[in-house]
Image (cartoon, grey):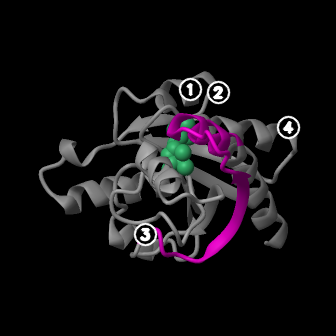
Amino acid sequence: MLNIAVFASGRGSNFEALQRAIVEQNISASIVVVISNNSSSGVLTLAQSFGIPALHISQRQYSDTKLFRQKVLDTLSAFNVNFIVLAGYMKMLDAEIIRTFPDKIINIHPALLPKFGGEGMYGMNVHRAVIDAHEKESGATVHYVNEAYDEGRIIGQQRVDVSQNETPESLAAKVLAVEHQLLPRVIKMLTEKN
Ligand code: GRF
């Protein structure tokens, strides 16, 4: 059974898609806590509406990195977390936390890695870069998180066509729709493997 902590900074549509899929498809996993670095992020209210504990934990609340890291680790242990999903989490996860959960942390990225990943490649920047590079296709990638961030082993990808008159906004919407399928599919596959 996966006891999942979702880390997110924004609206939380991937969290919602995953939570709904877990319930509807009877996936043997449970989102036990949602953690956001951003107190006004939609994901916190969304999680509460599903009755899932939603916590605002930010580096800014702590005078040093160690205390912040300890708070995150204590929270994960209090909720018996054994798997972490980064779904639009805009912060680097502390290296010590990554080491504590080897091969138990995944991230969803809105492009076909290894292309269009790394520094600065988030949000609309990604879709703009894909269009500027005249790519014929884009998509979503779920990968393991290691200390080099977007470079962890790829677990699954789902493609979309980039049309002639594509805009970053239209591409973002297309990719988001496949993210909502891919993330639950990967989680389901991982639970069936265990
Ligand atoms: C998604 O596009 C995800 O790929 C990226 O951040 C976005 C989060 O969207 N890492 P949401 O908060 O899940 O709606």
Amino acid under label 1?
Leu
Query: Dot 4: within a 10 Å radius of its alpha carbon, few (fewer than 14), some, or many (20 or more) residues?
Result: few
Task: Name the secondary structure under disc 2.
Answer: loop
Q: Secondary structure at mark 4?
A: helix
Mark 3 CB lies closer than 8 A to ligand 1: no
Q: Nearer the viewer, residue 170 or 185?
A: 170
Q: Residue type at mark 4?
A: Glu
Q: Residue at x 42, y 51 (%)?
A: 122
User: Where are the magenta residues, as a range?
Assistant: 149-177
| CA distance separating discs 1 and 3 | 26 Å
Are there few (<14), some (14-19), or many (20+) residues within 10 Å of tag 1?
A: some
| x and y, in percent, of residue 180 in the image | 70, 43
Picture quadrant of residue 82: bottom right
Residue 24's mark? 4
- Residue 39 percent coordinates (x, y): 34, 30
Mark 3 secondary-structure assignment: loop
Mark 2 to mark 3: distance in Å?
A: 29 Å
- Residue 149's label in the rendered image is 3
Who's the residue at 63% across and 73% down the image? 154
Give the position of the C terminus as an image quadrant: bottom right
Is the C-beta separation of discs 3 and 4 under 8 Å? no
Indicate whether residue 163 is drawn in magenta.
Answer: yes
Q: Is residue 17 left or right of residue 166?
A: right
Mark 2 vs mark 3: which is more N-terminal? Answer: 2
- Pointers 4 and 2 in contact (C-beta within 8 Å): no
Return the disc, 1 or 4, that comes first in the chain's sequence.
4
Q: Does residue 139 show up magenta in the picture?
A: no
- The residue lying toward the viewer, choosing from 149 and 2, is 149
User: Mark 2 = which residue?
Assistant: 50
